[in-house]
Amino acid sequence: MDSKSSPVEMFFFPYVGGGHQIPMVDMARIFASHGAKSTIIATPKHALSFQKSISRDQELGLSISIETLHLPDDTDIADTDMSASPRTDTSMLEEPLKALLAEHRPDCIVHDVFHRWSADAINGLGIPRLVFNGNGCFSRCVAENMGKYKPHETVSSDYEPFVVPGLPDRVELTKSQVPVMMRPPNQNGFGPRKMGKPEENSFGVVVNSFYELEPAYVEYLKKEMGNKAWLVGPVSLCNRNVEDKAERGKKATIDEQQVLSFLDSKESSSVLYISFGSLARLAPEQLLEIAYGLEASNHPFIWAVGKIFRSAGKEKENEEAWLPYGFEERIRESKRGLIIRGWAPQLLILEHPAIGGFLTHCGWNSTLEGVCAGLPMITWPIAAEQFSNEKLIADVLKIGVKVGSLHWVSWSTEPWAAVGRDKVEASVKRLMGGGEEAVEMRRRARELREKAKRAVEESGSSYMDADSLIQELNSLRNP
Ligand code: UDP
């Protein structure tokens, strides 16, 4: 292969939904914009959710395409509607993936850790393998030091705070906020789960973050990975036109004009946007508390409700039982709120000047998207590494207030009303009420927005990292 004439060929194997698929598709588009030849591997059904944005990139002249994995008898992965949980079994893709890689032999493959079998499957093919785990560097360092020092094993109750040792910042957690698989075995039978180590034998990791956001933690990761860590985020910033923003992940279930005219009618920085990401299913009881809290706060809002958890046997209960009586009529008449059932055009909403705050479950993508929009946040973590992200937002970056979420809840556990209406009301008033603390948080958040934008511009830190990975892959061709 001639390293001078043909672009580096990068294959991307995203997960089949949610907060892992979206950033990897963006990442493939970013590398194409840096001159690589990007190919996204997907099943036919899965590809539908991002096909249009790829076609738009192709029209702009970028070298990017989708390669579909054909499964016997036209079968497909069951959950490819953005709600695939980390437990969705995708192993039926193993043989088609291996065949595809053996045929094309790209310069590298970037694969998602939720395809749990993929590291082993790719090892041995002689193709440099890069790992994407969807998280930032801060939460990774917290997890590492939790594993190393086990501070949660020294406390006597689930709610006694402990400090995570060995970090540049003071990070306090309680055992109730630690992922169940990291806790010692308990009476429920949950115990530490052995996690695979996809980074072993890999060529390195690609991360959706940027140096200026979490410098000490980036240094730690780069050192740990022997400099084989490339930060190319925030990847959401590659979505520059309205269509890309409105259809990211999947097409919004609300007409974007309806959202925009609601926002256009509001004062600058006056509206709170509320979303719990692509996976979380809140219980009707919890949604009711949110509704009461929002109404009592008296601030305008857009609430992306997403999927609702239905207990076994209650699946057919009144769809609207989670709203207080007359709530929707009241907010419609007062023009104070907008409820989005289903998928919201999150990027479009966040960047509108009328948005002044983001109540988030602290998924890593949402966290970064809030940063890119220069928004202070109300943090309401639920699962995964979201409690660590909350500490980064509220305690380290000081751009958020905590709602007071105390319980890490596994995807498979029935959720309940963990946070009451009073806490919702108080945190909304604190963030949106115009007090000095909130003004200061907004100022810091806007500074970070500028840093995020600079990172992806020519000669910015993430721009340079993307270029340097391409160069390194190129140099493998002619060692
Ligand atoms: N998202 C969206 N509309 C929705 C819900 C989510 O566009 O109604 C996007 C959001 O912008 C983010 C991703 O889905 O890019 C969610 O990822 P995150 O890491 O925040 O949370 P997860 O869904 O993985 O819990």
Image (spheres, grey):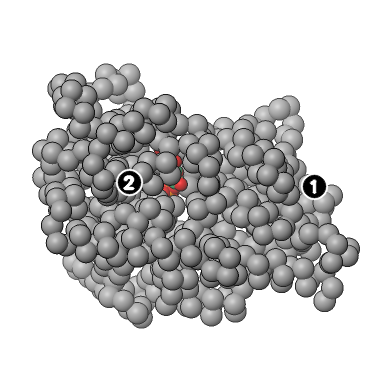
Disc 2: which residue: 353
* Residue 93, x across and y down, in percent: 68, 42
Q: Is residue 204 above or below residue 385?
A: below
First-in-chain label (2 vs 1): 1
Q: Is residue 441 left or right of residue 109?
A: left
Tell me if mark 1 has few (under 14), some (14-19) or many (20+) residues whose alpha carbon lies within 10 angstroms of its own.
few
Residue situated in front as seen by the camera: 205 or 192: 205
Helix, strand or loop under label 1: helix
Ligand 1 lies under 8 Å from the Cβ of mark 2: no
Give the alpha-carbon distance from disc 2 to disc 1, as whole Å.
48 Å
Please indicate, yes or no, whether residue 48 appears anywhere in the rendered image.
Answer: yes
At 41% across and 63% down in the image, what residue appears?
450
- 291 horizontally vs 222: left or right: left
Q: Nearer the viewer, residue 304 or 311?
A: 304
| Residue 283 image label | none
Residue in the image at 13% along x and 45% along y: 425
The single residue placed furthest to the right in the displayed view is 1
Where residue 53 sits: x, y (%)? 60, 39
Q: Is residue 39 visible?
A: no
Query: What residue is drawn where x is 45% and y is 68%?
Result: 137
Ligand 1 quadrant assignment: top left
Residue 244: x percent and y percent? 53, 40
Crowd band around label 2 with a 10 angstrom C-alpha radius: few (<14), some (14–19), many (20+): some
Q: Nearer the viewer, residue 227 or 103?
A: 227
Where is mark 1, residue-wise?
99
Q: Circles 2 and 1: CB distance less than 8 Å?
A: no
